[in-house]
Amino acid sequence: MKSNYLLKLESSLKRALSDIIANEVKKNIGFVTITDVDLTSDLSFLTVYYTVLSGKDKKKAKEGLEASKGYIRTSLVNKVSMRKAPELTFKYDETYEKAQRIDELIEQIHNEKTPN
């Protein structure tokens, strides 16, 4: 179970990352949304979960985020008061795509059971 301090810090980091990526990153990464962050208890590693508006932009977003990682880390420490910048890892969040696929399957099952 995470402490309240860690949860508040994660929330601040998520807001700051969203702002940095939307307004400061100069790489052409498309429309990236930060969906969640996971900070280790020793504050050394931050996993950043993101999605993109179009599934076609996944590769471009990943490359742009990785190329901007140093800038993002530096900017993050300036926006959120932390002694040191955590190591960033970017992971594509597939939750939305999985939910969409489940909806499609439910709709398909519903259509098969409903007589025409």
Image (tube, rainbow, N blue to C red):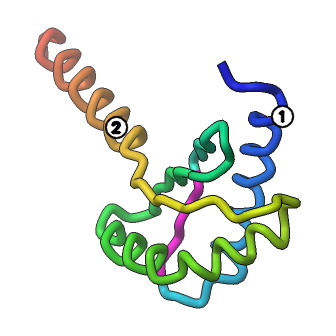
Amino acid bearing label 1? Tyr
Residue pictured at 70% horizontal, 52% vertical: 14
How busy is the neighbourhood of tag 1: few (under 14 within 10 Å), some, or many (20 plus)? few
Instruction: Count the numbered circles shown.
Output: 2
**Is residue 30 located in the magenta-colored stretch of the structure?**
yes
Q: Position of residue 25 (x, y in %)?
A: 62, 83
Q: In the displayed image of the protein, which residue is found farthest to the bottom?
A: 26
Residue 100, which numbered label? 2
Quarter assignment of residue 23 = bottom right
Q: Nearer the viewer, mark 1 or mark 2?
A: 1
Residue 113 at what x, y percent from top left? 14, 9
Q: Position of residue 8 (x, y in %)?
A: 82, 38
The foreground one among 51 and 89 is 89
Q: Is residue 80 magenta?
A: no
Report the side of 78 relative to 71 (left or right).
right
User: Which residues lie in the magenta part?
Assistant: 29-34
Quick one: quadrant of the N terminus?
A: top right
> Where does label 1 land, which residue?
5
